[in-house]
Image: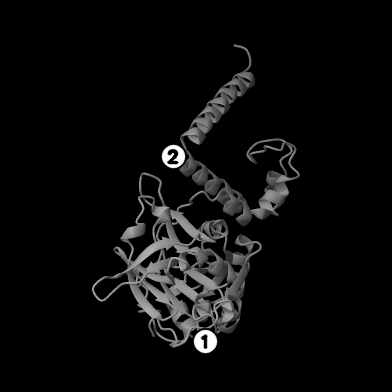
């Protein structure tokens, strides 16, 4: 099945009934209709982007699939480029002219990570997503730190995160792994699933039905297999993972949107080796909400949870109620997010430099006091 397959509609229904709109199964609703209205008055056609490829994109319209040129909306800002999941306004083409993307509708949500570029640029992986499914393979040991990183970006996107523990049929103790994942994902549903036995697939379909979901994770996490199981057909190629390290081979090379049988759509993504944060302070706070709650009881409102007296977070670590690993992960992600923001924001960079100098001077002063008079 092609991701562009849609039923034929020889006669367009009343567009005021959004549930009856031909694009309803692809997420068309009242807010989307309102955002598109000005473009409709210009004679443009609504479409959802299902795949992007070198100046062109595959889209789905009320009358079927359309391949459109994207050069008219090309932007030097990578955050503004056409992305899978976008809603677009297309100018119809003629017999010798291609369809053209004339505008993108404002995104409700966007899953953004930092690129490996030294210019600290962001990259949009999926747009207008309701659920961000973080796929974690149980065929290899769980990495809580990596899961927390994915979840920080998921929360920051505006979507609702969900952890799918894949390959439960290969896990010796799936219940224990689910408990560990739950500890790293407070407030997030953790769902063990298996494309082989079918475990959890009906629950996952019920949660995601009617909306837009994006599946994220490392290579070998079973994303494409999971998407095939959800769609009900082998729409994506699947390869075996390497036995030596349990890693996949990047079968998926592009981000692609597929319709689900029960309604809604799912976006498959290539395996992510690097998951760099991008302006994800709020996302980090959501992932570590337990630490934030503890911090309310700290003696100082600006407590850094390092050596300050009266620190409730450190007290929880000492008492064994907060794993030291989790506090270390929290500090690491905050530092990384601050560093990235400083590289892309000159004013913030200057403020961080001044703050560092103040702390350095204070450190020297405290060290001198400890040593005492010479």
In depth, the one of 83 and 215 nearer the eye is: 83
Specify the label residue 197 is tagged with.
1
In depth, the one of 246 and 97 nearer the eye is: 97
User: Residue 96 location in percent, x, y?
Assistant: 23, 73
In depth, the one of 147 and 169 nearer the eye is: 147
Between disc 1 and disc 2, whose residue precedes?
Answer: 1
Q: Is residue 72 above or below residue 310?
A: below
Q: Tell me which residue sits at (48%, 70%) in the image.
A: 215
Q: Using residue 289 as the reference point, say whether residue 70 is left or right of it.
A: left
How was the colour assigned to the protein in this rendering? one colour
Q: Quadrant of residue 237?
A: bottom left
* Residue pointed to by mark 2: 343
Cα distance, mark 1 to mark 2? Answer: 47 Å
Tag 1 secondary structure: loop
In depth, the one of 95 and 140 nearer the eye is: 95
In the rendered image, the quadrant that contains the C terminus is: top right
Q: Is residue 341 visible?
A: yes
In the rendered image, the quadrant that contains the N terminus is: bottom left
User: Residue 273 location in percent, x, y?
Assistant: 40, 60
User: Residue 119 location in percent, x, y?
Assistant: 37, 44
Tag 2 secondary structure: helix
Nearer the camera: disc 1 or disc 2: 2
Q: Quadrant of residue 92?
A: bottom left
User: Residue 267 location in percent, x, y?
Assistant: 45, 72
Graded by Cα atoms within 10 Å as few (under 14), some (14 to 19) or many (20 or more), the crowding at tag 2 reads some
Q: Tell me which residue sits at (43%, 84%) in the image.
A: 6
Q: Tell me which residue sits at (73%, 44%) in the image.
A: 312
């Amino acid at each position: 099945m092609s991701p562009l397959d849609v039923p034929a509609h020889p006669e367009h229904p009343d567009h005021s009934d959004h549930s009856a709109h031909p694009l309803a199964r692809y997420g068309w609703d009242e807010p989307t209709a309102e955002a598109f209205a000005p473009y409709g008055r210009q004679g443009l056609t609504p479409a959802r982007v299902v795949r992007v490829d070198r100046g062109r994109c595959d889209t789905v319209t009320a009358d079927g699939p359309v391949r459109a040129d994207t050069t008219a909306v090309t932007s030097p800002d990578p955050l503004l480029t056409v992305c899978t999941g976008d809603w677009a306004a297309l100018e119809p083409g003629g017999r010798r002219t291609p369809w053209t993307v004339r505008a993108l509708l404002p995104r409700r949500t966007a899953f953004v990570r930092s690129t490996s570029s030294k210019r600290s640029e962001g990259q949009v992986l999926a747009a207008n997503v309701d659920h961000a499914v973080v796929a974690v393979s149980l065929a290899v040991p769980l990495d809580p730190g990596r899961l927390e990183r994915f979840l920080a970006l998921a929360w920051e996107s505006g979507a609702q995160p969900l952890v799918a523990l894949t390959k439960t049929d290969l896990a010796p103790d799936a219940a224990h792994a689910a408990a560990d994942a739950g500890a790293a994902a407070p407030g997030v549903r953790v769902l063990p699933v298996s494309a082989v036995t079918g475990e959890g697939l009906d629950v996952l379909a019920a949660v995601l039905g009617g909306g837009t979901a994006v599946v994220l994770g490392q290579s070998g996490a079973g994303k494409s297999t999971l998407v095939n199981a959800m769609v009900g057909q082998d729409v994506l190629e699947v390869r075996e993972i390497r036995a030596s390290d349990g890693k996949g081979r990047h079968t998926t090379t592009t981000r692609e949107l597929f319709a689900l049988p029960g309604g809604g759509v799912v976006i498959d993504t290539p395996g992510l080796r690097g998951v760099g944060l991008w302006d994800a302070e709020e996302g980090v706070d959501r992932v570590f909400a337990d630490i934030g709650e503890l911090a309310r009881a700290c003696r100082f409102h600006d407590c850094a949870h390092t050596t300050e007296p009266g620190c409730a977070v450190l007290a929880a670590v000492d008492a064994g109620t907060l794993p030291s690993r989790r506090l270390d992960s929290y500090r690491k992600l905050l530092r990384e997010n601050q560093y990235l923001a400083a590289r892309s924001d000159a004013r913030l960079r200057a403020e961080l430099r001044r703050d560092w100098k103040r702390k350095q001077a204070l450190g020297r002063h405290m060290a001198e006091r400890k040593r005492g008079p010479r």
